[in-house]
Image: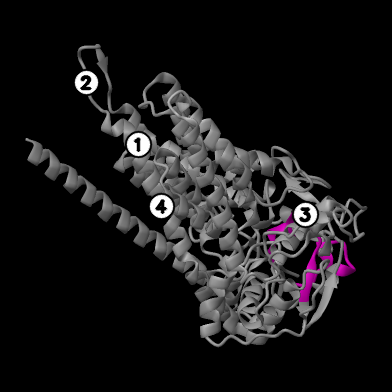
Amino acid sequence: MDVRLERGAKWRDSRIVLLLSAVLAIHTGLLAYSAYVHSPTHNEPAHLAAGVSHWELGHFDLYKVNPPLVRQIAALPVMAAGARTEWNDYFEGAATRPEFAIGDGLIAANGERSFFLFTIARWACIPFSWLGSIVCFLWARDLYGPRAGLVAAVLWCFEPNILAHAALITPDAPATALGLAACYTFWRWLRRPTWSQTLLTGVVLGVAELSKTTLLIFYPLWPLLWIVYRLPDRATMCLRDWTREGLMLITRLGLAVYVVNCGYGFEGSLTRLAEFRFESRMFTGKMPGEPGNRFADSWLGSLPVPVPRNYLLGIDAQKRDFENYRKASYLHGTWSPTGWWYYYFYAMAIKVPVGVLCLVLATILGKLAGQLPSKRLRDEAILLFPAIVILTFVSSQTGFSEHMRYVLPIFPFFFIWISQCLGSSMQSEQIELDRGVCRTRAMPLAAAGLLIWAIGSSLCVYPHSLSYFNELVGGPRGGHAHLLDSNLDWGQDLKYVKWWLETRLDDEPVFLAFNGPIDPIRVGIEVEPPASVADELSLQNLPPGWYAISVSYLRGVPWWSRLHKGQDVATELRVFTGFLNQKPIGTFGYSIYLYKIHR
């Protein structure tokens, strides 16, 4: 009997491994195709140019508001492919962001070949998403069983926001995967605090910190979680145990800082704090625009900073940008000079599949009703607390509200937690006659239905996952009434315009108002700007022809055109909102609407 049980367990495990491999293969195909069909989004040219500069120029001051790991990896195949680089727009200075001009120069130097370069750069970043899926599987398996692990991996691989950002070279999805991996290794250390696990956790944390500065929150959070996790054991732990684990914690954090320094090649490491020139009010103590250093005349100024120079300057630059940000925020048809504390809750309610939202609700209700097996509260606290802290921190930054991707790092923690709806409940299906309790298949079947609904909802919009909105707002076509920017219109659909132009049969003029980071002419898209918009307020005065308009302009974003062969044209007129009353002929993806004006 024991032999048969052992064989059955091995067969089930091997089947789950095969299923996980199949899911990862499908996920890879989805990401690879999405990376191919979409044009560069707003931040990608700057990221790629900065990544190339790190290798070619040997320093890290470009795009210093984010650590360099992801863009360095994205740059490797681009450099191997012989991409042309242009550094004429490069200049240094604490108050400058030259990477965007240099990214534009990268597009200009490579022309239409830029599409190929961004495709292979995106492909190089796909392994980050593999890591996220595998860690989801491992952590859910350890908590709730192998089936739950498979469910968590499936949620990662098919969730539209993960599919959208994992197919780009921006750091959001890689930081999500690496942050999850760091927290998983930390939880493993809490369960079995060994020195080998300490070293592994320190290295993983350091690599995660090289992806995005948001993860700095782990430095103060982990000591707190360690104390909370150990409190139930305080009666059995002696001073030696506390001291040993405290030293492990310090070693781990110190190792992570060392890894960060390695990632920057120790550029400017251990520079005295007084030698920095800051721009943000947080570090200067002055009014906006006045550089300085509030620590220069204090004893703190004599201390060496244990992180690379550009790492700290990047934090300062990011804070300066937040303090001086002047762009209006958009939510549910309303423009505001500031953001909203509930912005991310609202955004997740309409951009996360309804099936996933229902699984979260089902897990909460299942816990309250005792239908889901109980785990140690502190284990689930370690799982969920980082997500709650990140969401709270991001929501507190109400200077502006633009991008739901800022809370993407919380997603996998909830994927793991809700996986118990299918994993644990399926495994506990039984009839307890002695208690008179009959556990039916209703809950796991309902949960399976919700999972299938979520996957189907995502795939129905694919490959336009960046523009995904759920059924509560009518899908992607209703999304621009609620959110803009990287939630919907980030410049990703220009390739579809190019392909349409290559196959259309008529010779009527095509006017393009494109909300993207590149000049369409530089990549072989010969169109005209709707130049008369600068002078006319009525659509009736526009010349006849085709009009391809980004939805951001339909919703009142001021038009900024780069279509005059190097001459920028800007206007504050928001006349494109008049197209909202017109029925579009079609769409390119879901971010560019096509109209026809007849005479």
Query: x and y percent of residue 55 in the render?
Result: 60, 79
**Mark 3 touching mark 2, by CB under 8 A?**
no
Instruction: Looking at the image, tell me whether mark 4 or mark 1 is earlier in sequence order.
Output: 1
**Amino acid under disc 4:** Ser
Instruction: Looking at the image, tell me whether mark 3 or mark 1 is earlier in sequence order.
Output: 1
Local crowd at mark 4 within 10 Å, few (<14), some, or many (≥20)? Answer: few
Q: Which residue is mark 1?
A: 144
User: Secondary structure under badge 2?
Assistant: strand
**Mark 4 touching mark 1, by CB under 8 A?**
no
- Observer able to see residue 234: yes
Instruction: Looking at the image, tell me whether mark 3 or mark 2 is earlier in sequence order.
Output: 3
Report if residue 271 lies within the magenta region.
Answer: no
Instruction: Looking at the image, tell me whether mark 1 or mark 2 is earlier in sequence order.
Output: 1
Q: Which residue is mark 4?
A: 196
Q: Mark 2 or 4, which is nearer the eye?
A: 4
Write down the quadrant of residue 6 in the picture: top left
The residue under the point 61% across, 51% down is 215
**Amino acid under disc 2:** Ile
